[in-house]
Amino acid sequence: MMQTLENEHLLLAIETHLGDMPTSQVDTFGMLNIEVNRLQIVSIVKFLKESLEFNFLTDLCASHYPEKLGAEFEIVYHLHNFIANKRLRIKVALSENDIFIPTLTGVFVGANWMERETFDFYGIQFQDHPDLRRILNMEDMDYHPLRKHYALEDETRTDKDDKFFGR
């Protein structure tokens, strides 16, 4: 019960800062999840860090949902307030035709490599990033390997019998 009350206070503070209520939900472990638009991300993360002591960017990653037309990519930010031991998840949906989002490197220096990794695997363009280039894959790759545009298996293979793979 106390967790819900804390989430309500956190959501009220975010709503007051943004001027409107973000889409939100609480997952089964009591973590508040909010959805904001890309133009709000730097402002809300800066507010959470400076005013509500969410001083650690635990993770920044992405997911690709090709079936969600107009919101195919989802950028996910995990923030942690060590003092209150409170976690928060922020999501931003992006269209495949417009995959630009402001960088968080001005708020969290550690966002640098996480944004580079997200760019490397998904092609998300972090605007004003100080060094947006591939970090794990080869520079000359002309695709982003975690996008779900590619078949999981090579359908042209004839040397494979499905009965050996539980199909």
Image: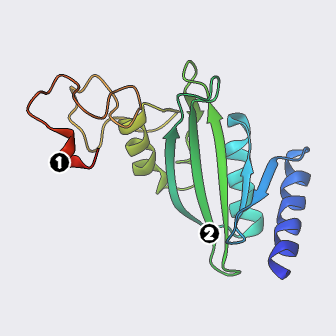
Viewport quadrant of the N terminus: bottom right
Q: Residue at x 69, y 68 (%)?
A: 28
Q: Which residue is mark 1?
A: 164
Q: Is residue 60 left or right of residue 155?
A: right
Q: Relative to 156, is 18 above or below?
A: below
Q: Is residue 108 left or right of residue 41?
A: left
Q: Earlier in the sequence, mark 1 or mark 2?
A: 2
Whether residue 124 is visible to the viewer of this picture, yes or no, is yes
Tell me the CA gap for discs 1 and 2. 45 Å
Q: Relative to 53, is 11 above or below?
A: above
Image quarter of residue 152: top left
Whether residue 107 is visible to the viewer of this picture, yes or no, is no
Q: Is residue 64 left or right of residue 152?
A: right
Mark 1 or 2, which is nearer the eye?
Answer: 1
Find residue 146 and name its label: none
Image quarter of residue 93: top right
Find residue 80 and name its label: 2
Amino acid type at image mark 1: Phe
Name the outermost residue toward the left.
159
| Mark 1 residue element | helix
Q: Number of labelled discs?
A: 2
Q: Residue at x 84, y 72 (%)?
A: 4
| Mark 2 residue element | strand
Amino acid type at image mark 2: His
Q: Residue at x 56, y 18 (%)?
A: 97
- Position in image of residue 23 (x %, y %): 81, 46
Viewport quadrant of the C terminus: top left
- Position in image of residue 40 (x %, y %): 74, 40
Q: Residue at x 70, y 63 (%)?
A: 27
Give neighbour class at mark 2: few <14, some 14-19, many 20+ (Cα, 10 Å). many
